[in-house]
Image: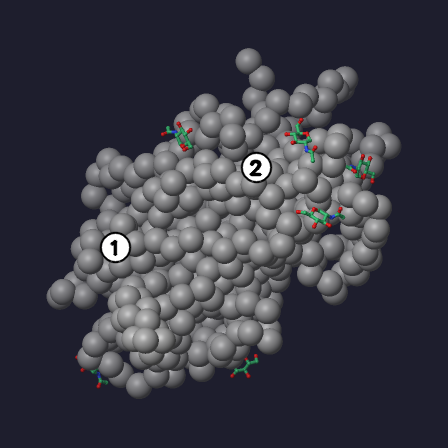
Amino acid sequence: MFLLVLSLLVSGSQASHFLGTMMTYYPVETQTNGSVSVILRYKQNFVECSQSVTWNCEGNCGSWTRMLPLTKVEEVSGEWCQTEGVITHQLPNNTGFQTKLDGGLWIDNILNRIVYWRAVAAVELRNRSDIGKPNTSPQTTILPALRVPVNCPRTINLLAFDPDGDEVKCRYGNAADSECNPCNPPPVLNVSSSCSLTFSSSVSNTSSELRYAVQLVVEDFPRQTITLTETGGSQEVKTTSDAISKIPLQFALKVIPEVPSCAEGSYVARFLPPTPDNRAQKFIQVNKVLEINIRAEATHSTVTGLLFSGPHNVSKSSPGSGSFTLSWTPTAAESGQSHPICFVVETSYNYNTYHSELRCVAVTVGNYYVVALRGRISTSLSLENDYDALVKQIKDELTRRGLHTGMNVRLHRMG
Ligand SMILES: *[C@@H]1O[C@H](CO)[C@@H](O)[C@H](O)[C@H]1NC(C)=O
Ligand SMILES: *[C@@H]1O[C@H](CO)[C@@H](O)[C@H](O)[C@H]1NC(C)=O
Ligand SMILES: *[C@@H]1O[C@H](CO)[C@@H](O)[C@H](O)[C@H]1NC(C)=O
Ligand SMILES: *[C@@H]1O[C@H](CO)[C@@H](O)[C@H](O)[C@H]1NC(C)=O
Ligand SMILES: *[C@@H]1O[C@H](CO)[C@@H](O)[C@H](O)[C@H]1NC(C)=O
Ligand SMILES: *[C@@H]1O[C@H](CO)[C@@H](O)[C@H](O)[C@H]1NC(C)=O
């Protein structure tokens, strides 16, 4: 009887259809009675949009509310679908928790043979001594699958930033190190702590498409020693070599048959202006439309589409051949937060589909605390194009006037 039940369970989860996941968190508020709430935002990648699994929370999980049921972000019909969900946990105190995704099976990844998936997010919510509030996790996203021709070495520079200003590091793995299996990256992939993945074209030629499962852990490290204080008063010290929180980032790397030329703009598309640079920062007010304009060309293939990963209600349009626009209207729920949007351009030649390099931008959503500032800073920089440089100029000026160097400066246009 026992055996029968087991074999039923196994056959029920036999389909190999998982292409990775991602989870990040933002704490929202701490009440005077010590209760804390936190928003978990996650992506799930499966072959079909209807497929999903439930995160299992362990620890001080409190009560939770589903703010957004799994909603489609982007899809390549028959290959993959990325969905996004949002859950808020209301906790009685600021003791953190872990949430896990466990199961089978990963989509066939003949190149490194990972069968069962496991992803863990470690949510730290104790009060940080440096910022006087709970930690926010690193923020990142990725498409479910990236295609790389077997003969073309490529570096994939992931966007992983931290709203608290912590140092973000990536490493290969899928969980607590003692539980991860296997813990080594596939042999053709080098993962740097700065979140760049280098694909070296050392696999021999292939006539079919082969996959790797890529499983990363992204962590935030304080830039100076800090103390975390629990609601009850107990404290823990975190040095610059101790991770504060931990999030999973998993996707598939598809190695495809060789391409006659690896040059960008030949078979693989090349981005043209005004496409934003990788890791560029954009700024948008709540309820205003952010438009990201993207242009790409390829001389030996046809530009066939744009694929993105980001908040579920980013919409895409194509005003002309090789031109694309991603639009997003953040709501008050995203106020004060920063979210990444990543994209690739697809080209097609002789029944093969190629992906351009991955580009990502970080979008900061404006909120309304306004510092009255007397004085004038004259600049030729613009809010839309030079956000980082402008913020730095203003910070330098405020620091000269005696304000704390650790302040957060966010800008928005008046009137
Ligand atoms: C926080 O609440 C949980 C109950 O969910 C309890 O087990 C834990 O001891 C509490 N922690 C503190 C520091 O009070
Ligand atoms: C603390 O206050 C919040 C908001 O007033 C309330 O929802 C929550 O139930 C309270 N929690 C505890 C542990 O009393
Ligand atoms: C967190 O710490 C700061 C000072 O470090 C303090 O002002 C603030 O009240 C604390 N918040 C909570 C919820 O304990
Ligand atoms: C990964 O990086 C290390 C050190 O930089 C180097 O020795 C190794 O050959 C690299 N592996 C691949 C597959 O590129
Ligand atoms: C590699 O494989 C492709 C597809 O099967 C084939 O067209 C190409 O000639 C092969 N290249 C080499 C160097 O063997
Ligand atoms: C985007 O999603 C949020 C949360 O689901 C929703 O409140 C908002 O209305 C959506 N915005 C648009 C423009 O669809």
> At x 32% / y 71%, what residue is drawn?
5
What residue is shown with label 1? Answer: 48
Q: Is residue 80 visible?
A: no
Q: Nearer the viewer, residue 388 or 64?
A: 64
The local secondary structure at tag 1 comes to loop
Residue 93 found in image quarter = top right
- Residue 53: x and y in percent read 38, 55
Q: Amino acid at mark 2?
A: Gln
* Above/below status of 122 relative to 313: below
Identify which residue, 289 or 85, lies in the foreground. 85
The colour scheme used to paint the residues is one colour
| Left or right of residue 266: residue 351 | left
Decide which of 369, 232 is in the foreground and name it. 232
- Residue 116: which quarter of the image? bottom left
Q: Is residue 11 visible?
A: yes
Residue 345 locus on image (x, y percent): 30, 53
Query: For the C terminus, which image quadrant?
Result: top right
Q: Position of residue 129 (x, y in %)?
A: 81, 45
Q: Residue at x 34, y 63 (%)?
A: 18
Q: Residue furthest right?
A: 402
Between circles 2 and 1, the one closer to the viewer is 1
Q: Residue furthest front?
A: 1
Q: Position of residue 179 (x, y in %)?
A: 55, 74
Residue at x-position 84% and y-position 46%: 233
Quadrant containing the N terminus is bottom left
Task: Determine crowd level at label 2: few under 14, some 14-19, many 20+ residues with C-alpha closer than 10 A.
Answer: some
* Number of marks in the rendered image: 2
In the image shown, does 28 or 223 lie closer to the viewer?
Answer: 28
Residue 31, above or below 73: above
Residue 255: image tag: none
Q: Is label 2 within 8 A of ligand 6 (CB to nearest ligand atom)?
A: no
Residue that mark 2 sits on: 337
